Image: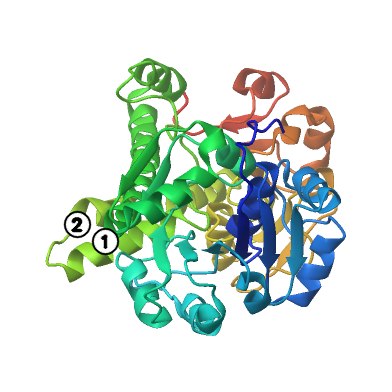
Amino acid sequence: MTAPRPEPGSKSVAVIGAGHVGLTTAVCLAQLGHEVICADSDRQKVERLRRGDPTFVEDGIGELLREGLASGRLRVIADAVEAVVEAEFSFLCLPTPGRKDGTTDVTALEEVVRRIAPRLRAGAIVVTKSTVPMGSVRLVEELLRRPDVAVVSNPEFLRESTAVRDTLHPDRIVVGAEDPGAAARVADLFAATRAPLLITDPVTAETVKYASNAYLATKLSFANSLARVCELVGADMRDVLLGMGYDSRIGFDYMRPGPGWGGSCLPKDVRALAYVAESAGYEFRLLHEVLASNEEQMATVARRVLAAAGERADAVVAVWGLTFKAGTDDQRDSPALNVVGRLLEQRASVRAFDPTVTGDLPGLPGSLELCFDPYAACEGASVLAVLTEWDEFRWLDFQKVKGLMAAPSIVDTRNLLDPAAMRRLGFDYVGIGRP
Protein backbone atom coordinates (compact mmCIF):
# COMPACT_ATOMS: atom_id res chain seq x y z
CA MET A 1 0.00 0.00 0.00
CA THR A 2 1.62 3.25 -1.13
CA ALA A 3 1.37 5.99 1.48
CA PRO A 4 1.73 9.75 1.05
CA ARG A 5 5.19 11.10 1.79
CA PRO A 6 5.35 12.05 5.50
CA GLU A 7 5.76 15.66 6.47
CA PRO A 8 8.82 16.71 8.51
CA GLY A 9 8.32 16.73 12.25
CA SER A 10 7.51 13.35 13.76
CA LYS A 11 5.08 13.44 16.71
CA SER A 12 4.69 11.05 19.63
CA VAL A 13 1.27 9.39 19.55
CA ALA A 14 -0.53 6.93 21.81
CA VAL A 15 -3.41 4.93 20.40
CA ILE A 16 -5.60 3.30 23.03
CA GLY A 17 -7.39 0.26 21.65
CA ALA A 18 -6.14 -2.14 18.97
CA GLY A 19 -9.46 -2.97 17.35
CA HIS A 20 -10.30 -2.14 13.75
CA VAL A 21 -10.14 1.61 14.21
CA GLY A 22 -7.29 1.63 16.69
CA LEU A 23 -4.85 -0.66 14.91
CA THR A 24 -5.56 0.93 11.53
CA THR A 25 -4.97 4.38 13.02
CA ALA A 26 -1.76 3.23 14.70
CA VAL A 27 -0.14 1.55 11.70
CA CYS A 28 -1.09 4.40 9.38
CA LEU A 29 0.21 7.13 11.68
CA ALA A 30 3.46 5.17 11.94
CA GLN A 31 3.52 4.93 8.14
CA LEU A 32 3.13 8.71 8.00
CA GLY A 33 6.32 9.02 10.04
CA HIS A 34 5.08 9.44 13.61
CA GLU A 35 6.26 7.54 16.69
CA VAL A 36 3.30 5.46 17.82
CA ILE A 37 2.54 3.30 20.84
CA CYS A 38 -0.61 1.22 20.50
CA ALA A 39 -2.06 -0.14 23.75
CA ASP A 40 -4.72 -2.79 24.30
CA SER A 41 -5.82 -4.55 27.49
CA ASP A 42 -6.06 -7.94 25.74
CA ARG A 43 -2.61 -9.43 26.32
CA GLN A 44 -3.11 -12.29 23.87
CA LYS A 45 -3.97 -9.77 21.17
CA VAL A 46 -0.91 -7.72 22.08
CA GLU A 47 1.37 -10.75 21.74
CA ARG A 48 -0.06 -11.55 18.31
CA LEU A 49 0.39 -7.98 17.15
CA ARG A 50 3.97 -7.90 18.40
CA ARG A 51 4.64 -10.88 16.13
CA GLY A 52 3.20 -8.90 13.20
CA ASP A 53 0.02 -10.98 13.11
CA PRO A 54 -3.16 -8.87 12.78
CA THR A 55 -6.21 -10.03 14.70
CA PHE A 56 -8.71 -9.22 11.94
CA VAL A 57 -8.92 -9.37 8.15
CA GLU A 58 -8.13 -6.07 6.43
CA ASP A 59 -6.28 -5.43 3.19
CA GLY A 60 -2.78 -4.05 3.83
CA ILE A 61 -2.95 -4.06 7.64
CA GLY A 62 -0.42 -6.87 8.12
CA GLU A 63 2.12 -5.28 5.81
CA LEU A 64 1.99 -1.92 7.59
CA LEU A 65 1.99 -3.56 11.03
CA ARG A 66 5.17 -5.50 10.28
CA GLU A 67 6.79 -2.50 8.62
CA GLY A 68 6.01 -0.26 11.59
CA LEU A 69 7.38 -2.77 14.08
CA ALA A 70 10.55 -3.33 12.03
CA SER A 71 11.22 0.39 11.68
CA GLY A 72 10.73 1.01 15.40
CA ARG A 73 8.09 3.66 14.71
CA LEU A 74 5.38 1.39 16.14
CA ARG A 75 5.25 -0.38 19.49
CA VAL A 76 2.40 -2.48 20.88
CA ILE A 77 1.93 -2.76 24.65
CA ALA A 78 -0.75 -3.85 27.12
CA ASP A 79 -0.76 -0.76 29.37
CA ALA A 80 -2.74 2.32 28.34
CA VAL A 81 -1.24 4.41 31.12
CA GLU A 82 2.31 3.62 30.05
CA ALA A 83 1.40 4.51 26.47
CA VAL A 84 0.22 8.04 27.25
CA VAL A 85 2.89 9.19 29.71
CA GLU A 86 5.14 10.79 27.09
CA ALA A 87 2.64 11.13 24.25
CA GLU A 88 1.80 14.47 22.70
CA PHE A 89 -1.44 12.97 21.34
CA SER A 90 -3.58 10.19 22.83
CA PHE A 91 -6.19 8.72 20.47
CA LEU A 92 -9.15 6.97 22.10
CA CYS A 93 -10.15 4.09 19.82
CA LEU A 94 -12.31 2.10 22.21
CA PRO A 95 -15.46 0.02 21.76
CA THR A 96 -18.65 2.09 21.81
CA PRO A 97 -21.35 -0.51 21.09
CA GLY A 98 -24.88 0.56 20.41
CA ARG A 99 -27.83 -0.52 22.52
CA LYS A 100 -31.17 -1.53 21.03
CA ASP A 101 -32.80 1.74 22.11
CA GLY A 102 -30.24 3.77 20.13
CA THR A 103 -28.09 4.83 23.08
CA THR A 104 -24.36 4.20 23.01
CA ASP A 105 -22.39 2.33 25.65
CA VAL A 106 -19.32 4.47 26.45
CA THR A 107 -18.29 2.51 29.56
CA ALA A 108 -14.93 1.46 28.09
CA LEU A 109 -14.18 5.05 27.07
CA GLU A 110 -14.99 6.40 30.53
CA GLU A 111 -12.87 3.78 32.30
CA VAL A 112 -9.80 4.49 30.20
CA VAL A 113 -10.14 8.27 30.52
CA ARG A 114 -10.25 7.98 34.31
CA ARG A 115 -7.15 5.78 34.29
CA ILE A 116 -5.00 7.94 32.05
CA ALA A 117 -6.10 11.34 33.41
CA PRO A 118 -3.43 11.75 36.11
CA ARG A 119 -0.59 10.53 33.89
CA LEU A 120 -1.08 12.69 30.81
CA ARG A 121 1.69 15.21 30.25
CA ALA A 122 0.87 18.90 30.45
CA GLY A 123 -0.12 20.27 27.06
CA ALA A 124 -1.13 16.86 25.70
CA ILE A 125 -4.14 16.44 23.43
CA VAL A 126 -6.70 13.66 23.90
CA VAL A 127 -8.47 12.75 20.65
CA THR A 128 -11.78 10.89 20.41
CA LYS A 129 -11.49 8.76 17.28
CA SER A 130 -14.12 6.03 17.50
CA THR A 131 -17.74 6.97 16.94
CA VAL A 132 -19.07 8.57 20.12
CA PRO A 133 -22.32 10.37 20.98
CA MET A 134 -22.60 14.10 20.48
CA GLY A 135 -21.22 15.81 23.54
CA SER A 136 -18.52 13.20 24.21
CA VAL A 137 -15.69 15.73 24.03
CA ARG A 138 -17.33 17.61 26.89
CA LEU A 139 -17.77 14.31 28.77
CA VAL A 140 -14.08 13.46 28.37
CA GLU A 141 -13.12 16.95 29.55
CA GLU A 142 -15.22 16.50 32.69
CA LEU A 143 -13.71 13.09 33.40
CA LEU A 144 -10.14 14.32 32.87
CA ARG A 145 -10.42 17.42 35.06
CA ARG A 146 -7.22 18.62 33.39
CA PRO A 147 -7.46 22.21 32.11
CA ASP A 148 -3.92 21.78 30.80
CA VAL A 149 -5.04 18.99 28.44
CA ALA A 150 -7.12 19.70 25.31
CA VAL A 151 -9.76 17.30 24.01
CA VAL A 152 -10.43 17.10 20.28
CA SER A 153 -12.87 15.15 18.11
CA ASN A 154 -11.40 13.50 15.00
CA PRO A 155 -14.00 11.01 13.74
CA GLU A 156 -12.97 8.12 11.52
CA PHE A 157 -14.61 7.39 8.18
CA LEU A 158 -13.19 3.93 7.55
CA ARG A 159 -14.82 1.23 5.48
CA GLU A 160 -13.91 -2.28 6.52
CA SER A 161 -11.87 -4.00 3.78
CA THR A 162 -10.51 -0.60 2.61
CA ALA A 163 -9.67 0.94 5.99
CA VAL A 164 -5.94 1.36 5.33
CA ARG A 165 -6.55 3.11 2.02
CA ASP A 166 -9.26 5.25 3.59
CA THR A 167 -6.82 6.37 6.29
CA LEU A 168 -3.84 7.11 4.07
CA HIS A 169 -5.93 8.63 1.27
CA PRO A 170 -9.04 10.01 3.02
CA ASP A 171 -11.86 11.92 1.39
CA ARG A 172 -11.59 14.50 4.18
CA ILE A 173 -10.20 15.11 7.64
CA VAL A 174 -12.68 16.42 10.20
CA VAL A 175 -11.41 17.98 13.44
CA GLY A 176 -13.65 19.39 16.16
CA ALA A 177 -12.23 21.51 18.98
CA GLU A 178 -12.91 24.61 21.02
CA ASP A 179 -9.18 25.40 20.96
CA PRO A 180 -8.07 26.35 17.41
CA GLY A 181 -4.45 25.62 18.28
CA ALA A 182 -5.24 22.08 19.41
CA ALA A 183 -7.30 21.53 16.26
CA ALA A 184 -4.43 22.66 14.06
CA ARG A 185 -2.00 20.33 15.85
CA VAL A 186 -4.26 17.31 15.31
CA ALA A 187 -4.84 18.25 11.66
CA ASP A 188 -1.08 18.50 11.17
CA LEU A 189 -0.71 14.80 12.02
CA PHE A 190 -2.49 14.01 8.74
CA ALA A 191 -1.03 16.83 6.64
CA ALA A 192 0.82 14.39 4.38
CA THR A 193 -2.48 12.98 3.12
CA ARG A 194 -3.29 16.31 1.43
CA ALA A 195 -6.98 15.66 2.16
CA PRO A 196 -9.57 18.44 2.42
CA LEU A 197 -9.74 19.68 6.01
CA LEU A 198 -12.78 20.76 8.02
CA ILE A 199 -12.11 22.34 11.40
CA THR A 200 -15.24 22.94 13.42
CA ASP A 201 -16.60 22.64 16.96
CA PRO A 202 -16.67 19.23 18.71
CA VAL A 203 -20.42 18.58 18.55
CA THR A 204 -20.51 19.38 14.84
CA ALA A 205 -17.59 17.02 14.17
CA GLU A 206 -19.34 14.24 16.10
CA THR A 207 -22.55 14.87 14.18
CA VAL A 208 -20.76 14.70 10.81
CA LYS A 209 -19.92 11.06 11.53
CA TYR A 210 -23.48 10.06 12.43
CA ALA A 211 -24.97 12.05 9.57
CA SER A 212 -22.62 10.45 7.04
CA ASN A 213 -23.44 6.90 8.11
CA ALA A 214 -27.17 7.59 8.31
CA TYR A 215 -27.14 8.97 4.76
CA LEU A 216 -25.17 6.00 3.44
CA ALA A 217 -27.64 3.62 5.10
CA THR A 218 -30.49 5.58 3.52
CA LYS A 219 -28.93 5.14 0.07
CA LEU A 220 -28.61 1.39 0.65
CA SER A 221 -32.21 1.08 1.78
CA PHE A 222 -33.35 3.12 -1.21
CA ALA A 223 -31.41 0.80 -3.54
CA ASN A 224 -32.98 -2.27 -1.93
CA SER A 225 -36.49 -0.79 -2.18
CA LEU A 226 -35.93 0.28 -5.77
CA ALA A 227 -34.79 -3.26 -6.59
CA ARG A 228 -38.18 -4.56 -5.43
CA VAL A 229 -39.92 -2.07 -7.73
CA CYS A 230 -37.73 -3.17 -10.64
CA GLU A 231 -38.70 -6.78 -10.06
CA LEU A 232 -42.40 -5.91 -10.07
CA VAL A 233 -42.33 -3.82 -13.25
CA GLY A 234 -39.75 -5.88 -15.14
CA ALA A 235 -36.90 -3.35 -15.11
CA ASP A 236 -33.22 -4.29 -14.76
CA MET A 237 -31.87 -2.81 -11.52
CA ARG A 238 -28.32 -2.93 -12.83
CA ASP A 239 -29.07 -0.57 -15.68
CA VAL A 240 -31.33 1.63 -13.54
CA LEU A 241 -28.44 2.19 -11.13
CA LEU A 242 -26.07 2.88 -14.02
CA GLY A 243 -28.44 5.52 -15.28
CA MET A 244 -28.70 7.08 -11.85
CA GLY A 245 -25.06 6.78 -10.85
CA TYR A 246 -23.74 8.89 -13.70
CA ASP A 247 -25.62 11.82 -12.17
CA SER A 248 -22.89 13.59 -10.19
CA ARG A 249 -25.45 14.55 -7.55
CA ILE A 250 -26.12 10.88 -6.83
CA GLY A 251 -23.05 8.80 -7.72
CA PHE A 252 -22.53 5.04 -7.69
CA ASP A 253 -21.34 4.51 -4.11
CA TYR A 254 -23.78 2.73 -1.80
CA MET A 255 -26.25 2.20 -4.61
CA ARG A 256 -25.98 -1.59 -4.80
CA PRO A 257 -28.92 -3.71 -3.65
CA GLY A 258 -28.28 -6.69 -1.42
CA PRO A 259 -29.67 -8.77 1.44
CA GLY A 260 -29.66 -5.71 3.70
CA TRP A 261 -26.96 -3.56 5.22
CA GLY A 262 -25.06 -4.10 8.45
CA GLY A 263 -21.61 -4.00 10.03
CA SER A 264 -20.24 -2.37 13.13
CA CYS A 265 -21.17 1.22 12.19
CA LEU A 266 -24.24 1.82 10.06
CA PRO A 267 -26.90 0.07 12.20
CA LYS A 268 -25.79 1.51 15.53
CA ASP A 269 -25.10 4.98 14.12
CA VAL A 270 -28.50 5.23 12.42
CA ARG A 271 -30.22 4.15 15.65
CA ALA A 272 -28.06 6.58 17.63
CA LEU A 273 -28.90 9.56 15.41
CA ALA A 274 -32.60 8.71 15.58
CA TYR A 275 -32.33 8.49 19.37
CA VAL A 276 -30.46 11.80 19.66
CA ALA A 277 -33.07 13.51 17.50
CA GLU A 278 -35.92 12.08 19.56
CA SER A 279 -34.21 13.10 22.81
CA ALA A 280 -33.96 16.63 21.43
CA GLY A 281 -37.68 16.66 20.60
CA TYR A 282 -37.71 15.63 16.94
CA GLU A 283 -38.99 12.33 15.57
CA PHE A 284 -36.64 11.53 12.67
CA ARG A 285 -39.21 9.42 10.82
CA LEU A 286 -37.04 8.94 7.75
CA LEU A 287 -34.40 7.14 9.79
CA HIS A 288 -37.01 4.93 11.44
CA GLU A 289 -38.23 4.02 7.97
CA VAL A 290 -34.66 3.30 6.85
CA LEU A 291 -34.23 0.88 9.77
CA ALA A 292 -37.62 -0.72 9.09
CA SER A 293 -36.80 -1.01 5.38
CA ASN A 294 -33.60 -2.86 6.21
CA GLU A 295 -35.43 -5.35 8.42
CA GLU A 296 -38.02 -5.84 5.69
CA GLN A 297 -35.28 -6.49 3.11
CA MET A 298 -33.66 -9.21 5.22
CA ALA A 299 -37.05 -10.84 5.87
CA THR A 300 -37.88 -10.71 2.15
CA VAL A 301 -34.57 -12.34 1.21
CA ALA A 302 -35.17 -15.14 3.72
CA ARG A 303 -38.65 -15.75 2.29
CA ARG A 304 -37.23 -15.79 -1.23
CA VAL A 305 -34.63 -18.38 -0.29
CA LEU A 306 -37.25 -20.60 1.34
CA ALA A 307 -39.51 -20.26 -1.68
CA ALA A 308 -36.66 -21.28 -3.98
CA ALA A 309 -36.10 -24.34 -1.76
CA GLY A 310 -39.70 -25.34 -2.28
CA GLU A 311 -40.78 -24.39 1.26
CA ARG A 312 -40.16 -28.01 2.32
CA ALA A 313 -39.73 -28.79 6.01
CA ASP A 314 -36.62 -30.81 5.20
CA ALA A 315 -35.10 -28.14 2.95
CA VAL A 316 -31.32 -27.93 2.96
CA VAL A 317 -30.02 -24.43 2.22
CA ALA A 318 -26.43 -23.87 1.11
CA VAL A 319 -25.09 -20.45 2.13
CA TRP A 320 -22.01 -18.76 0.72
CA GLY A 321 -20.85 -15.88 2.91
CA LEU A 322 -21.53 -14.97 6.54
CA THR A 323 -19.64 -11.71 7.10
CA PHE A 324 -21.47 -8.44 6.56
CA LYS A 325 -19.40 -7.70 3.43
CA ALA A 326 -16.47 -9.15 1.53
CA GLY A 327 -12.90 -8.34 2.49
CA THR A 328 -13.46 -8.52 6.24
CA ASP A 329 -14.03 -11.16 8.90
CA ASP A 330 -16.46 -8.89 10.78
CA GLN A 331 -19.80 -10.54 11.54
CA ARG A 332 -21.32 -7.71 13.58
CA ASP A 333 -24.89 -6.98 12.48
CA SER A 334 -24.27 -9.07 9.37
CA PRO A 335 -27.33 -9.22 7.11
CA ALA A 336 -26.10 -12.66 6.04
CA LEU A 337 -26.34 -13.94 9.61
CA ASN A 338 -29.71 -12.24 10.02
CA VAL A 339 -31.01 -14.11 6.97
CA VAL A 340 -29.49 -17.37 8.21
CA GLY A 341 -31.20 -16.86 11.56
CA ARG A 342 -34.56 -16.40 9.85
CA LEU A 343 -34.01 -19.59 7.81
CA LEU A 344 -33.18 -21.53 10.96
CA GLU A 345 -36.30 -20.19 12.66
CA GLN A 346 -38.27 -21.81 9.82
CA ARG A 347 -36.49 -25.09 10.61
CA ALA A 348 -34.44 -25.13 7.44
CA SER A 349 -31.11 -26.97 7.59
CA VAL A 350 -28.32 -24.56 6.72
CA ARG A 351 -24.86 -25.56 5.50
CA ALA A 352 -22.62 -22.51 5.19
CA PHE A 353 -19.17 -21.53 4.02
CA ASP A 354 -17.26 -18.28 4.50
CA PRO A 355 -13.50 -17.98 3.85
CA THR A 356 -12.96 -16.17 7.17
CA VAL A 357 -15.36 -17.96 9.50
CA THR A 358 -14.41 -21.02 11.56
CA GLY A 359 -15.78 -22.36 14.81
CA ASP A 360 -19.20 -21.94 16.36
CA LEU A 361 -21.50 -18.98 15.77
CA PRO A 362 -23.45 -18.43 19.01
CA GLY A 363 -26.84 -16.79 19.23
CA LEU A 364 -28.50 -18.41 16.22
CA PRO A 365 -31.92 -20.02 16.79
CA GLY A 366 -31.01 -23.44 15.33
CA SER A 367 -28.20 -25.63 14.11
CA LEU A 368 -25.84 -24.16 11.52
CA GLU A 369 -23.30 -26.48 9.92
CA LEU A 370 -20.08 -24.70 8.94
CA CYS A 371 -18.36 -26.34 5.98
CA PHE A 372 -14.67 -26.42 5.03
CA ASP A 373 -15.19 -25.29 1.44
CA PRO A 374 -18.00 -23.88 -0.75
CA TYR A 375 -18.58 -27.18 -2.52
CA ALA A 376 -19.17 -29.06 0.73
CA ALA A 377 -21.87 -26.55 1.65
CA CYS A 378 -23.79 -27.44 -1.54
CA GLU A 379 -24.05 -31.18 -0.94
CA GLY A 380 -27.74 -32.15 -0.99
CA ALA A 381 -28.93 -28.55 -0.99
CA SER A 382 -32.24 -27.50 -2.51
CA VAL A 383 -31.02 -23.93 -3.01
CA LEU A 384 -27.77 -21.97 -2.86
CA ALA A 385 -27.97 -18.49 -1.29
CA VAL A 386 -25.07 -16.13 -2.02
CA LEU A 387 -25.16 -13.74 0.96
CA THR A 388 -21.70 -12.11 0.90
CA GLU A 389 -19.94 -10.87 -2.25
CA TRP A 390 -16.60 -12.72 -1.91
CA ASP A 391 -15.05 -12.47 -5.38
CA GLU A 392 -13.72 -16.03 -5.24
CA PHE A 393 -17.29 -17.31 -5.50
CA ARG A 394 -17.46 -16.07 -9.11
CA TRP A 395 -14.77 -18.47 -10.30
CA LEU A 396 -15.94 -21.78 -8.83
CA ASP A 397 -16.87 -24.83 -10.92
CA PHE A 398 -20.63 -24.39 -11.17
CA GLN A 399 -21.07 -27.60 -13.11
CA LYS A 400 -19.65 -29.33 -10.03
CA VAL A 401 -21.92 -27.22 -7.80
CA LYS A 402 -24.96 -28.31 -9.78
CA GLY A 403 -23.97 -31.96 -9.50
CA LEU A 404 -23.72 -31.71 -5.71
CA MET A 405 -27.11 -30.06 -5.19
CA ALA A 406 -30.46 -31.81 -4.83
CA ALA A 407 -32.01 -29.06 -6.99
CA PRO A 408 -30.17 -26.51 -9.18
CA SER A 409 -31.46 -23.27 -7.67
CA ILE A 410 -29.51 -20.08 -6.81
CA VAL A 411 -30.65 -16.97 -4.96
CA ASP A 412 -27.88 -14.43 -5.56
CA THR A 413 -28.54 -11.63 -3.08
CA ARG A 414 -25.40 -9.73 -4.16
CA ASN A 415 -25.89 -9.99 -7.94
CA LEU A 416 -22.39 -11.45 -7.97
CA LEU A 417 -22.87 -14.13 -10.61
CA ASP A 418 -23.70 -13.92 -14.33
CA PRO A 419 -27.42 -14.78 -14.66
CA ALA A 420 -27.15 -15.86 -18.29
CA ALA A 421 -24.21 -18.17 -17.56
CA MET A 422 -26.00 -19.72 -14.60
CA ARG A 423 -29.16 -20.33 -16.60
CA ARG A 424 -27.19 -21.88 -19.46
CA LEU A 425 -25.84 -24.38 -16.93
CA GLY A 426 -29.40 -25.23 -15.96
CA PHE A 427 -29.75 -23.28 -12.73
CA ASP A 428 -32.95 -21.57 -11.67
CA TYR A 429 -31.29 -18.21 -10.97
CA VAL A 430 -32.84 -15.35 -8.95
CA GLY A 431 -31.01 -12.07 -8.39
CA ILE A 432 -32.00 -8.83 -6.65
CA GLY A 433 -33.85 -6.37 -8.87
CA ARG A 434 -33.00 -8.26 -12.07
CA PRO A 435 -35.46 -9.81 -14.54
Are the residues tagged 1 and 2 within 8 Å (C-beta)? yes
Q: Position of residue 239 (x, y in %)?
A: 43, 17
Amino acid bearing label 2: Phe
Q: Is residue 379 visible?
A: yes
Choose between 364 and 113: the one closer to the eye.
113
Q: Is residue 132 above or below residue 387?
A: below
Graded by Cα atoms within 10 Å as few (under 14), some (14 to 19) or many (20 or more), the crowding at tag 2 reads some
The residue drawn where x is 67% and y is 33% is: 3
Q: Quick check: 331 left or right of 299?
A: right
Q: Position of residue 416 (x, y in %)?
A: 62, 30
Amino acid bearing label 1: Ala
The residue drawn where x is 40% and y is 65% is: 151
Choose between 280 and 11: the one closer to the eye.
11
Query: Where is residue 76, by image quadrant?
Result: bottom right
Q: Is residue 236 above or below residue 355?
A: above
**Residue furthest left as drawn:** 281
The residue drawn where x is 20% and y is 62% is: 277
| Image color mode | rainbow
Q: Please give the residue where the numbered disc 2 appears in the rendered image.
A: 284
Q: Is residue 221 above or below residue 241?
A: below
Q: Earlier in the sequence, mark 1 or mark 2?
A: 1
Q: Quadrant of the N terminus?
A: top right
Q: Quick check: 333 left or right of 400?
A: left
Q: Position of residue 268 (x, y in %)?
A: 41, 62
* Disc number for residue 274: 1
